[in-house]
Image: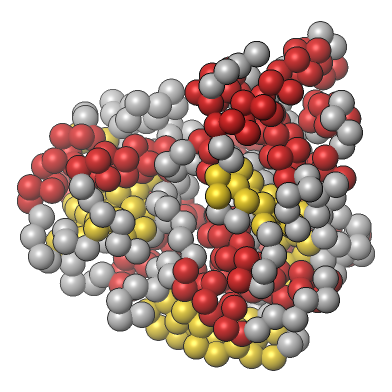
Amino acid sequence: MVETGSKAIEWIHSRRPFGQRPGLERVKALLALVDHPEKKVPTIHIAGTNGKGSTVSYLKEMLQEAGIVVGTFTSPYIESFHERIAINGKFITDEELVTLVNKYQPLVEKLDQQEAVSGITEFEVLTALALDYFVGKVDVAIIEVGLGGLLDSTNIVEPMLTGITTIGYDHTEILGDTLEEIAAQKAGIIKPNIPVVTGNIADNALGVIIDTATKNNAEIYRFGKEYAVTYLHPDDNWGEWFDFRNQNGKLKNLKTALIGRHQPENAGVAIQLFELYCALNKINWQEKEIKKALQQTFWPARMERLSSEPLIILDGAHNTHAMKRLVESMQDEFKGRKLHILFSALETKNVTEMLQELLKLKNGHIYLTTFDYPRAIKLDDDFVNIDDKRVSIVSLWQFGLAEILEKMDDESLLLVTGSLYFVSEVRSLLLEMGGTHAS
């Protein structure tokens, strides 16, 4: 028995790390012992290499504006472990977590005695806890895939809608070396006769998704085809303006609260899913609900303005695909600024490629560092063909941060980027130092 929230989290963390043994057998066995909560919660299932988090956040806000009670299961967390499981943005409490862990701990130990289903992972436990928590409390739960799709433990759900945001190179050691192989894993969430909405995806990867949808008789709503987003311009203060159109008509002059040219694309996936959900449930929606929801969406460490004076932006661009998007956004939005870039990543990522993307920011100096995490990069690694005149190696990121903050003036911008685990550590210290959230 655990008695505190910290002990409950400690037990969850004690399970084998996520992603080591893909497959649904263990989570199926666990959910069978608690009378199948996955069959009792209406769900929307979201996969994708990048953009899942902001898409979930936009969609949650729209559904809430329409008066719907929404559960969210997301990862990783930025500020608090509890944010991974939430209802209408309110995180699960310590007491609720303790109750659930005390329910599941003996069940997991029981399954550990059976070789075929032993070794339930941390993420499998969390998936079960979240679904159990949502039973009877939510109208719909938006479930974000942890890794891939086909063999991810969240693929136990029986969704009313699915979404696939983007396809890029990430977790190639598990998901495959080509975009087509990665797309096949993401497309694994597509279910027979269940509509799927796709984001801005390259044709070769999209072809795999279309094939999977066709085989499953799943109606597909493609970016640029069944629905479209027209990017207009950045907001003078913060955000992006765009138009949206689909079979229901056109929504003009929509504004996101998050910056980056890709944000209207993520918002487009969310709008299409929202309208489909409302149609399935015979809910009348209003344009003002969508507009308000987009403008109040907040997603920490995704192009988050933590402070205006000095200007500090945090973005967890944790793979090459996300880094390309980040660099495009910085070039679009902050041409005249002198950039100080504090960057670290996990050693499983293509750090050389990510650095090469960052070096496209000609007005930027990169402070390459590491952080206290088992798979964080080592600074003695050989990052190939990197221009060392514009890259400084900083052994302690805290010292690098202090050095940058001392140098900053009105023309400067601090960008903290790379691994979300790293960005959340820096974010925590900046907030302690008195950096204010200004998004």
Instruction: Single out the residue that lies furthest toward the top.
Output: 113
Q: Residue at x 31, y 56 (%)?
A: 437
Name the side, left or right, on which 365 lies relative to 105. Answer: left
Q: Residue at x 72, y 76 (%)?
A: 275
Which corner quadrant holds the N terminus? top right
Name the side, left or right, on which 417 lies relative to 287. Answer: left
**136 lies above or below 214:** above
Q: Residue at x 16, y 61 (%)?
A: 309
Q: Position of residue 268 (x, y in %)?
A: 60, 73
Q: Does residue 34 appear in this view?
A: yes
Could you say which quadrant of the image residue 124 lies in? top right
Could you say which quadrant of the image residue 153 lies in? top right
Q: Residue at x 55, y 54 (%)?
A: 89
**Toward the viewer: 269 or 387?**
269
Q: Position of residue 41 (x, y in %)?
A: 80, 49
**366 lies above or below 161:** above
**Toward the viewer: 106 or 342?**
106
Q: Position of residue 321 (x, y in %)?
A: 49, 55
Could you say which quadrant of the image residue 245 lies in? bottom right
Name the side, left or right, on which 137 lies relative to 115. Answer: left
**129 lies above or below 193:** above
Q: Does residue 170 appear in this view?
A: no
Q: Position of residue 372 (x, y in %)?
A: 35, 26
**Toward the viewer: 271 or 343?**
271
